Image (spheres, rainbow, N blue to C red):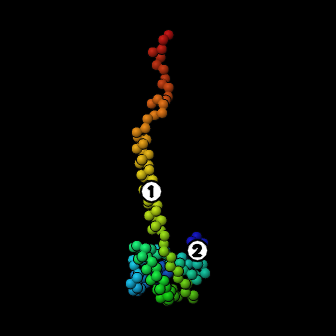
């Protein structure tokens, strides 16, 4: 976020690292799939942290991973408090990151645009001129003029 204070930005980075490490090493919930923490934002008053994540898999795996993260939220928050040493440990909110879906959508649009460009190029290659092939007047050759 553009108006984020330097302290909030620094602490958000630390929270991102702590949560990612906990997901990788300490959370043993079988519902938890292949989760990647992509980013974290912290309010300027350092009270609320939003952690963005992605899950590799189908919608069922994504939903079960979201439930696993929600149930492990308290454990992660207490670990964040221990490792950061701030007076008030921020509450954690997990939000599925829409970046992969957005990127996929953009790639689909680019592919569609490439196909349309190729189709247009093929049509243009077969097209004829509307008028003469050379619409410009040629300079007269003085040797061919009667006179």
Q: Secondary structure at mark 1?
A: helix
> Residue 30: x, y in percent?
38, 84
Which residue is at 53% across, 80% downward? 93
Circle 2 crowding by C-alpha within 10 Å: few under 14, some 14–19, many from 20: some
The one nearer the camera, 133 or 144, is 133
Q: Residue at x 48, y 83 (%)?
A: 70
Q: Quadrant of residue 43?
A: bottom right
* SS category of the residue bearing label 2: loop
Label 1 packing within 10 angstroms: few (<14), some (14-19), many (20+): few
Which residue corresponds to mark 2?
Answer: 4
The number of discs equals: 2
Q: Is residue 28 above or below residue 100?
A: below
Q: Is residue 75 visible?
A: yes
Q: Is residue 49 left or right of residue 133?
A: right
- In which quadrant of the rendered image does the N terminus lie? bottom right
Q: Which residue is mark 1?
A: 110
Q: Nearer the viewer, mark 2 or mark 1?
A: 1
Up-down: is 47 above or below 131?
A: below
* 62 on left or right of 5: left
Residue, x 48% and y 14% (percent of image)? 145
Where's residue 73, x and y in %? Answer: 49, 85
């Amino acid at each position: 976020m553009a108006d984020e204070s330097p302290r909030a930005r620094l602490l958000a980075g630390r929270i991102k690292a702590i949560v990612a490490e906990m997901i990788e090493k300490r959370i043993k919930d079988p519902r938890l799939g292949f989760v990647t923490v992509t980013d974290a934002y912290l309010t300027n008053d350092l009270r609320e942290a939003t952690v963005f994540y992605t899950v590799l898999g189908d919608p069922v795996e994504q939903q079960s991973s979201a439930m696993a993260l929600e149930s492990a939220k308290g454990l992660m928050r207490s670990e964040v408090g221990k490792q950061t040493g701030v007076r008030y440990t921020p509450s954690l909110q997990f939000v599925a990151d829409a970046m992969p879906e957005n990127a996929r959508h953009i790639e689909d649009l680019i592919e569609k645009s490439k196909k349309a460009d190729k189709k247009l190029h093929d049509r243009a290659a077969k097209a004829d001129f509307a008028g003469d092939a050379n619409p410009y007047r040629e300079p007269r050759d003085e040797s061919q003029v009667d006179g």
